[in-house]
């Protein structure tokens, strides 16, 4: 899901939480952070993806992911730094 779609769904009340997660060394070649949008109905939760694929977008910096969450409409975010 791209940022524009996410903003529309946030405005419609679908998403209620933004979670920034550290990427895992085991699951991703790229190191950084992913932005997950948590929906009221768990099955509607989604990651922000790249424009070219459905793979989660990897942000190199934590603040970049936080800024994108703010642009979608979230006033606060949860950050998960645990190493999988």
Image (cartoon, rainbow, N blue to C red):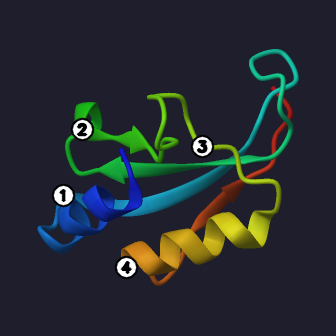
Residue found 48% across the figure and 61% down from its top: 18
Q: Secondary structure at mark 4?
A: loop
Among numbered discs 4 and 1, the one appearing first in the sequence: 1
**Dot 2 and dot 3 residues touching (CB under 8 Å):** no
Residue found 82% across the figure and 62% down from its top: 61
Camera-nearest label, 2 or 3: 3
In the image, which disc is placed on residue 57? Answer: 3
Q: Is residue 11 above or below residue 80?
A: below
Kindly indicate the quadrant of the structure image that contains residue 6. bottom left
Name the residue tied to disc 1: 14
Q: Secondary structure at mark 1?
A: loop
**Dot 3 and dot 4 residues touching (CB under 8 Å):** no
- Looking at the image, residue 61 sits to the left or right of residue 57; the answer is right
Distance of mark 2 from mark 3, alpha carbons?
18 Å
Camera-nearest label, 4 or 1: 4
Image x and y of residue 19, in percent: 55, 55
Quadrant in which the N terminus is drawn: top left
Distance of mark 4 from mark 1, alpha carbons?
12 Å
Distance of mark 1 from mark 2, alpha carbons?
8 Å
Pick whichever, 65 or 39, lies toward us.
65
Kindly indicate the quadrant of the structure image that contains residue 3. bottom left
**Dot 4 and dot 1 residues touching (CB under 8 Å):** no
Give neighbour class at mark 3: few <14, some 14-19, many 20+ (Cα, 10 Å). Answer: many
Name the residue tied to disc 2: 44
Give neighbour class at mark 2: few <14, some 14-19, many 20+ (Cα, 10 Å). Answer: few
Q: Is residue 42 above or below residue 16?
A: above
Name the residue tied to disc 4: 73
Give neighbour class at mark 4: few <14, some 14-19, many 20+ (Cα, 10 Å). Answer: some
Image x and y of residue 40, in percent: 23, 51
Distance of mark 3 from mark 1, alpha carbons?
20 Å
């Amino acid at each position: 899901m791209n940022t524009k779609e996410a903003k529309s769904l946030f405005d419609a009340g679908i998403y209620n939480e933004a979670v920034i997660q550290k990427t895992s060394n085991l699951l991703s070649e790229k190191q950084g952070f992913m932005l997950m949008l948590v929906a009221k109905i768990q099955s509607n939760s989604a990651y922000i993806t790249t424009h070219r694929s459905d793979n989660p977008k990897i942000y190199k910096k934590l603040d970049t992911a936080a800024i994108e969450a703010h642009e979608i409409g979230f006033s606060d975010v949860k950050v998960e730094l645990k190493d999988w």
